Image (tube, rainbow, N blue to C red):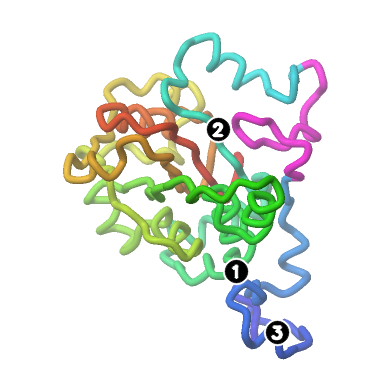
Amino acid sequence: MVCLICGQDRQERMTFRTLLSADSSPGFCRTCREKFVKIPQGHSCRLCGRDLGLMDEKFISGSVCTDCRRWEKSGGNGCFGRNIALYSYNDWMKEVITTFKFRGDAALAVGFRKEFRAAGRKIIGKDWRTHWERLRNGKHHPRETCVIVPMPLSGNRLKERGFNQAEVLAELIGEPVVPALCRIGGERKQSKKNRRERLESGENPFKLDEAFSEVLHGTKVLLIDDIYTTGATLRRAAAAFERADPKCVDSLTLIHG
């Protein structure tokens, strides 16, 4: 098998488990894989998921970064709970994500399947560890319902790329994906905006598809996107769910930028 990034032979030993498992084939060679910077889940901001090890301690308080403290003080969180991110943004990730999103190579997402699927299933309570913890603690009640919703693209952006990168990532989890959000109209690309422009964008560009209101009522919602930057986009998306009165809205992103 060849690496999805560099095209070189991955030279990884095949085993019986490798052949049977959907999670065991990362799709990247070791050289390419080691250029990514994984976020240690035990040392990340408990609200946005950023790697706290990359920050000066004066910008951290109670395992929460300064940016998230600002969101808390501003009252801008609404029903948004927290984000979990798997990788930090670096030059290598920038190159790969540009190929993935802007050059239309959706196949690259398969290389992140193992990690993304594991993280998603842990959040929604369908990984074996969560199941074992429930049994060990005597919790035999049904699992809490969680609805997976990809961040939507505008019609123009979808036509331009040919796919929605958030939907591609959501499908890696292996559970039903619900297109409950719509994007209203077109706007300037998020990647072209600076921090202030992202935070100061006015009207909410997201709208709930009312056909899914009943499905979302009282449930956990897991938003899926490729990158968390300021958190403004995900919080606006979460605000669009308020009419349906979900229990909470969390998010899972591949990257924290």
For the residues marked 1 and 3, what is the alpha-carbon distance in whole angstroms?
A: 18 Å
Q: Is residue 166 above or below residue 60?
A: below
For the residues marked 1 and 2, what is the alpha-carbon distance in whole angstroms?
A: 25 Å
Question: As shown in the figure, which amino acid type bears the numbered disc 2?
Answer: Arg
Q: Indicate which disc residue 111 carries.
A: 1
Q: Which residue is mark 2?
A: 82
Image point 41% across, 50% down: which residue?
148
In the foreground, 85 or 257: 85
How many neighbours does mark 3 have within 10 angstroms: few (below 14), some (14-19), or many (20 or more)?
few
Q: Which one is earlier in the sequence, the residue at label 1 or at label 3?
A: 3
Q: How far from the left and from the top, in percent, is residue 15?
A: 75, 89
Q: Nearer the viewer, mark 1 or mark 3?
A: 3
Q: Which one is earlier in the sequence, the residue at label 1 or at label 2?
A: 2
Magenta range is 40-58
How many neighbours does mark 2 have within 10 angstroms: few (below 14), some (14-19), or many (20 or more)?
many
Question: 97 left or right of 55?
Answer: left
In the foreground, 131 or 27: 131
Q: How far from the left and from the top, in percent, is residue 68?
A: 60, 21
Is 125 one of the magenta-colored residues?
Answer: no
